[in-house]
Amino acid sequence: MAVHQYNGPETGEECALLKIEGAYYKDYWLFLDVPLTAGLDSLDRFLREIWLECCGHMSAFFGKGHQEMKNSRKFSTFEPGEQFLHEYDFGDTTETLITVAGHTRREPQKAAVRLLARNIPPLIPCSRCGAPAAYVSTDNNIYKHKEPFLCKACAHESEIEEFSLPVTNSPRIGICAYYGDLDVYAFDAEKFAHREK
């Protein structure tokens, strides 16, 4: 992976540029910047809101050798190219891989973590008819389930809406009680699909 260093004017606050992706679901990714003076706790809060929060589960960051890191650890202590994990919910765990892609500068922001880019939601077809899926089965192993993804019409026909979760733009899709309701960056994948045709 190429590591980019910031070589621009020495103004603003120096930040770590982060690439974040689902550890097992690489279709879900984010690029963020966060001041070097900020701690891991600010990233934990951001990840909970955009990708993870469902039931107030515990979470932690892990470095080399799966050693737990303190949430107070500052981004100034990480080197470009360094990678570490974030784990949310130690029962039905969602893991994200964080890579320090380099350093950059920005004008001071109100929020510590700033979203720079995000994946377009993967277009997941309904297991029955092929239309864009709106619901996912709450079966613990959704990818072995016979019909894990259903569009609104097929879900209504099967009367399973109340036993399913919405399709979300998150590696926590279909897990525990994740609805993505805190994700203020969400957009309607179905409308996007129609616009692209």
Image (cartoon, rainbow, N blue to C red):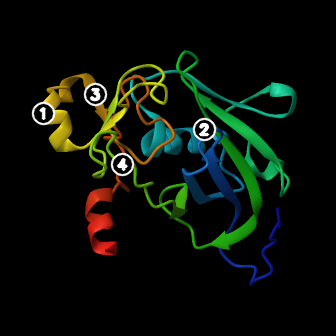
Q: Which residue is mark 3?
A: 164
Q: Are marks 1 and 2 in contact (CB under 8 Å)?
A: no
Vertical relation: 38 (above or below) 114: above
Q: Which residue is mark 4?
A: 125
Q: Are marks 4 and 2 in contact (CB under 8 Å)?
A: no
Q: Which residue is mark 1?
A: 157
Q: Which of pointers 2 and 3 indicates the residue nearer the eye?
A: 3
Q: What is the C-alpha distance between the residues marked 4 and 2?
A: 36 Å
Q: What is the C-alpha distance between the residues marked 3 and 1?
A: 13 Å
Q: Amino acid at mark 4?
A: Pro
Residue closer to the observer: 89 or 78? 89
Q: Quadrant of the N terminus?
A: bottom right
* Residue drawn at x 71%, y 36% as measured from the top left: 85
Q: Residue furthest bottom?
A: 9
Q: What is the C-alpha distance between the residues marked 2 and 3?
A: 31 Å
Q: Amino acid at mark 1?
A: Glu
Q: Earlier in the sequence, mark 1 or mark 2?
A: 2
Callout 3 secondary element = strand
Callout 2 secondary element = helix
| Tag of residue 41 | 2
Q: Amino acid at mark 3?
A: Ser
* Residue drawn at x 34%, y 42% as measured from the top left: 167
Callout 1 secondary element = helix
